[in-house]
Every structure is written in structure tokens, then in C-alpha cells.
Image (tube, helix red, strand yellow):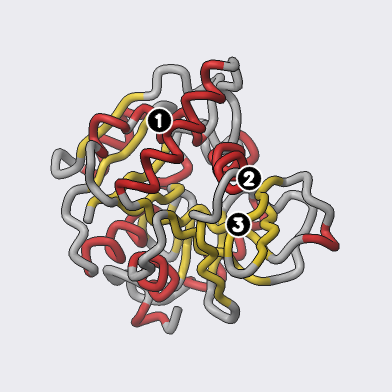
Amino acid sequence: MDAVIVAAGEGKRLRPATRNTPKCLLPIGGKPLIEYSLGILEERGVERIGFVVGYLKDRIIEALGPQYTYISNPFYAFTNDMASLWLAKQFIGSNDFMYLHSDLLYHPRILMMTMESDAEIALAVEKKDCDKEAMKVVEDGGYLVESSKEIPLTKAFGEWTGIAKFTNAGWRKYFFEVEQLLAEGDFNAYDTKAMTRLAQKEKSIKIIPFQGLPFIEIDNAEDFKEANDKLAGLPASPDLRSEGL
């Protein structure tokens, strides 16, 4: 199985830390944030990994090296993760793949559960009480109904983590919805907007819920501090198992 990691954004909410450093390279527990995801993926046999890069892309390429494929999003200032994933279409081809945002720190089991799902599309969702900024999820019978930040807190099942698995069949369906949104000029849409459109047509996006497993999406200075507090003083490792995460 392959993996696509979207890492094109500017990380504006983390400035000044991201003024000269891409968010995925910010230090967490003594090493760049993205190395945790890379270690988890590679421990599980994912060898072919594509990065969609934009903001400070040369810094990412220099830091991570030539063993990965880099896909440029020259429109990163005007687009979002949905458009970045669309740009990876040639890299994806007809393969099944894991899809990840690049600003995540998480327990390896979250990725493993998602990877092992037999659904056409599987979304890792943390079941919890959400805040207003969370990418909230509404589910029915274990399948996605809707995902957006605008969902009322009382309706939310939990928060989508930015970790998903696509089979080739699921990708083709999702890709159609993405192209429709892009054709409509919705270049700055979140990836979940296309997921919601697909979910309104059929039950093909399965929710993989979890609770009690460490997960942080690092969007702002508070998230950054929390992540470092959890890993401060602990040895760097390929994944988070030795830290008890």
C-alpha cells in the first residue's frame, strides 16, 4: 500500500514558528513532527510515500531526502487539502493508499485500524465532545453522513483526524466529487466537503472510531506546546510505542 501526505499549507496559526519552517518540520520531542508519521507508515510496510508540498517546499525536500516522491502545489496560498490531494492523482494511479495530513501526532494503532478496514473509504474519527474549530463528523450506522466545522456541537459524533484509507474504488468515487467541486470554482474546499457530497449519495465512507488513544492535530501554539509537553525528555523513536503513545 502507498501513502499520500499533504504538506503544502503555510501554517499561519503557528507563526512566527512557521515563518521560516514548514509546520511538518517543527520539532516535537526532539525531532521533526512528520518523522513520527513516516516511522509509523514505514513500520507497517508502506514504502512508497508521496508528499504534496507548496509553502517552503525546498525545506521539506532537503530535510526528508530523495526517497520520497514530491508533488508540487504551486497554488497552495489559494487552495486547501482537497486540491492538494487532487494534484497527487498521477502518483496514486490505481493503487490503494493511506491519506494523511502532515500535522498529526498519534498512536500507531489509529493508523493500523484504519489501514486494516475493508471499506472503500475509511476515516479515523476520535469519538469525543468537539470544540467549534474541530472538523466534526456526523455518522449513521458506522458510515459518514457529513463532516465540516459548521456542524452543531450537539450533533457531532467526534472529530475527523486527517487519517484515511482509500481503495481504488473509493478513490474513483471521491475523485469524481473533487473534480466537480473544482469545476465549480471551489478551490479552497476542505477534503471533507467532497467526502460529504459522496456520503449523501451512498454509504461508502466508513467511520473507524477510537477513544483513549493519544491524538493531536497541531494547528496553533497551544497544540504545539501540548505535543511537546507529552514527549519532552523522551527518546526519539521510529514511532510512538516506546513513549507509551
Q: Is residue 24 left or right of residue 43?
A: right
Instruction: Say few, some or many: other residues with alpha carbon within 10 Å of mark 3 (under 14 / 14 to 19 / 20 or more).
Output: many
Residue located 58% across and 62% down the image: 143
Mark earlier in primary sequence (1, 2): 1
How far apart marks 1 and 2 lie (CA) works out to 20 Å
Residue located 85% across and 62% down the image: 154
Q: Position of residue 30 (x, y in %)?
A: 39, 62
Q: Quadrant of the image for the N terminus?
A: bottom left
Residue located 56% across and 72% down the image: 209
Q: Determine contact: label 2, label 3, CB under 8 Å.
A: no
Instruction: Say few, some or many: other residues with alpha carbon within 10 Å of mark 1 (under 14 / 14 to 19 / 20 or more).
Output: some
The answer to whether residue 3 is above or below residue 31 is above
How far apart marks 3 and 1 lie (CA) works out to 21 Å
Q: Which residue is mark 3?
A: 144
Q: Is residue 46 left or right of residue 128?
A: left
Instruction: Pick the residue in front: 80 or 18.
Output: 80
Q: Position of residue 54 (x, y in %)?
A: 40, 27
Q: Which residue is mark 2?
A: 200
Q: Quadrant of the image for the C terminus?
A: bottom left
The amino acid marked with disc number 2 is Gln
Q: Is residue 14 visible?
A: no
Q: Which residue is mark 1?
A: 86
How far apart marks 2 and 3 lie (CA) works out to 9 Å
